[in-house]
Amino acid sequence: MLEKLCNLDNKTAIITGASSGLGVQFAKALTKAGARVALVARREEKLKKVKEMLTQMGGKIEYYTADVTISDQVEKCIHSIQKDFGQIDILVNNAGFATLEPTEEHNLDSWHSPTTKVVCFPFSSSDAFCVRCTLGNSWSGPTGRD
Ligand SMILES: NC(=O)c1ccc[n+]([C@@H]2O[C@H](COP(=O)([O-])OP(=O)(O)OC[C@H]3O[C@@H](n4cnc5c(N)ncnc54)[C@H](OP(=O)(O)O)[C@@H]3O)[C@@H](O)[C@H]2O)c1
C-alpha cells in the first residue's frame, strides 16, 4: 500500500545540495521510490560517490556540478538535465548552509556575505527550476531564447 502511494517510477527529481548531508538522504529516498535522480552540487568528487552508491541501489542517476547562486550555471545545469532526462517532475531545493552563531550576533555585513545569495537562491533557482518543471521542454526562456 505504502509502496503504491510512494511510487515515483518514471518521474525525474532534481536534488540541489546532493553531495552531502540531507541531500544524500533525500536522494536515497527518491531512488528507493523509483524516481530518476539528478544530483546537483559543486563538489564533483562527492557527487560521483553519491551517484555510485545510488546506482548500486538500482537507481538511474546523473550528477551535475553547479553553484546554484550563479544563474548561468543553474541554466546550463537545467538544460543538461532536460537533455538527459526530459521532463522534470520534482525539485528538492535543499542546497544551503546554516550559520551557527546566535541570531543576535548577526550583523548586516554577514547578511550581505554569501548568506544573502544562499537565502535568495531558493527564489532564483526555484523560479528557473519550477518553470521548467511545470512547462517542461516547451518553455523557451524569459527572453524567448532556449
Ligand atoms: N541539518 C539540519 O539540521 C538542518 C536544519 C535546518 C535547515 N537545514 C538546511 O537543509 C539544507 C541541507 O543541510 P545539511 O545539514 O544537509 O547541510 P550540508 O551537509 O552542509 O549540505 C549542504 C549541501 O548544499 C550544497 N551547497 C551549498 N552551497 C551550494 C551552492 N552555492 N551551490 C550548490 N550546492 C551548494 C553542498 O554541496 P557542495 O558544497 O558540494 O556544493 C551540500 O551538498 C541546508 O539548506 C540547510 O540550511 C538543515
Image (spheres, rainbow, N blue to C red):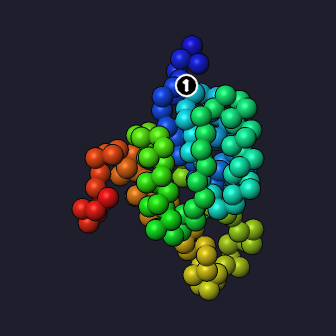
Which residue is rendered at x = 72% and y = 45% of the image?
50
Q: How many marks?
A: 1
Q: Name the residue located 74 percent from the left edge and 56 percent from the top edge.
A: 45
Quadrant of the rendered image holding ligand 1: bottom right
In the image: residue 73, left or right of residue 57: left
Kind of residue at badge 1: Cys
Residue drawn 48% across the image and 52% down it: 80
Can you give x and y, in whole percent of width and height, for residue 48 in the image? 71, 49
The local secondary structure at tag 1 comes to loop
| Image quadrant where one finds the N terminus | top right
Using the image as rendered, state which of residue 30 and residue 45 is in the foreground.
Answer: 45
**On screen, residue 35 above or below 74:** above
Pinpoint residue 129: horizontal percent, then vertical percent.
Answer: 43, 53
Q: Could you say which is closer to the camera, residue 104 or residue 129? A: 129
Q: Height in image: 2 above or below 114?
A: above
Position of 47 relative to 30 (above/below): below
* Residue linked to disc 1: 6
State whether residue 22 appears in this view: no
Q: Residue at x 66, y 78 (%)?
A: 106
Which sits in the foreground, 93 or 99? 93
Instruction: Find residue 128 and report its horizontal and vertical position in percent.
Output: 40, 58
User: Quadrant of the rendered structure where residue 117 is?
Assistant: bottom right
Q: Residue lying furthest bottom in this view?
A: 109
Pick the quarter of the image with the C terminus.
Answer: bottom left
Give the farthest residue toward the left.
144
- Sort mark 1 into few (<14), some (14-19) or many (20+) by Cα contacts within 10 Å: some
